[in-house]
Amino acid sequence: MMKPIFKKFLKFTLATLGILALIVAILGVMLYRNLGDLPDESRFAHLPYYPNKATGKGGFIRFDGYTPNGRLPMILLDKTSFRQPENFAYYWLGHATAILELDGQRFLTDPVFDNANPLNLPLIAPRFQEAPIRRENLPDIDVVLISHDHYDHLEATTIRHLADKAKRFIAPLGVGARLESWGVPADKITELGWGDSTMVGTVKLTAETTQHYTSRWTNDRNKTLWASFVLEGSKRLYWSGDTGYAQHFSDIGKKYGGFDIAFMEIDAANSGWPKTHMFAHQSVQATLDLNAKKIVPMHWGVFSLGRNPWYQSIDNAVKSAKENNLPIDVPKMGEKYANGFVNDNWWEAKHLRRE
């Protein structure tokens, strides 16, 4: 006959296991909801940059962090901050998330408002700076523009929120499967391969090459494509996405004959993972290769990804731009950037730096 103390121990053990199983199940559901579906690989079999023969697997071919000592200065936004989309205006929302208006069309780039990891927990790639606007307060969006599917560029919660609100979603090949699994209707999605174009009103949008990679889990590396974007309207703009420094910048510069502004990633490079991001001086050189008149840095100020002090990349970008006589503008998060912008060196505030 089972002793009472053993019965109690058995009940406790079973209850504990049951709770652990429930926790694992909940985490599993959360993880699944944020991974997103993968595309049918047969769609890309004819492309010269797919499959990835270097690895023998399917997939596209890929050519202690420091935080501010306080909140970075920013301009808070809500729906009342916006009217009809302008001929040109840019609002940096932090990292690679921005509202870009060109010729009456409003683009929302790589929308991420939470932490950059599958479970949205402040343990892996946590935000050290909130966005200047909540996703619920975003203005009407004509196009959600996605450069690739990494967690710091593509957020399931935000896509679900925008699925029935934004008019179109434009993304590299394969990312549409992710979007559909989060509720975006297929007829709203336009997928682009490198060199492919689509019209957004009078703006011609073209996906171009970058040197990067994709994944949202351990078994899906390079199953979707990554891209930079060229926007051609009353201004010709370049959006770098994520990329290492390579020949493609010079090639794109020659193809388009130059740009009015290059919005360039400047942060997250690390010598331990080469060819995936650029150090700031490389971002400046890439802008020169593009034959762009001006650089506006992005992909910084929110996440500590390259394991360097938060201000190091922007300091180096400004220094390198000045050495190369390249105009550089650094708007605050939420600050309207248009004509007549004047830098106030806000990022140099000593009270924000842990030196």
Image (cartoon, rainbow, N blue to C red):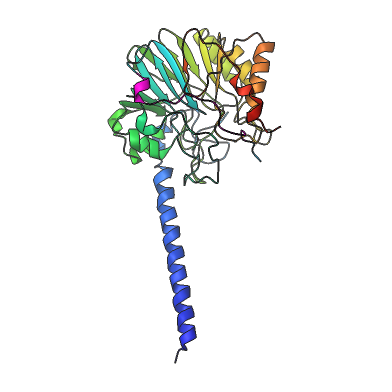
Q: Quadrant of residue 254?
A: top right
User: Between residues 353 and 144, which one lies in front from this camera angle?
Assistant: 353
User: Between residues 27 and 282, which one lies in front from this camera angle?
Assistant: 27
Inspect the magenta stretch and tell me whether residue 108 lies in it.
no
Please determine whether, in this image, residue 9 is positioned above or below residue 44: below
- Image quarter hosting the N terminus: bottom left
User: Between residues 55 and 347, which one lies in front from this camera angle?
Assistant: 347
Residue name at image x 62 percent, y 26 percent: 278
User: Between residues 313 and 209, which one lies in front from this camera angle?
Assistant: 313
Please tell me whether the stretch drawn in magenta is mainly helix, strand or loop.
loop
Residue 39 appears in the figure: no
- Image quarter hosting the C terminus: top right
Task: Where is residue 244? Give x, y as percent.
Answer: 60, 26
Residue 7 appears in the figure: yes
Inspect the magenta stretch and tell me whether residue 72 lies in it.
yes
Q: Which residues are magenta?
A: 67-82
* Apparent side of residue 32 relative to residue 261 in the rendered image (left or right): left
Please determine whether, in this image, residue 122 is positioned above or below residue 186: below
Residue found farthest to the bottom: 1
* Apparent side of residue 308 relative to residue 165 in the rendered image (left or right): right
Task: Where is residue 150? Give x, y as percent.
Answer: 49, 36
Q: Quadrant of residue 88?
A: top left
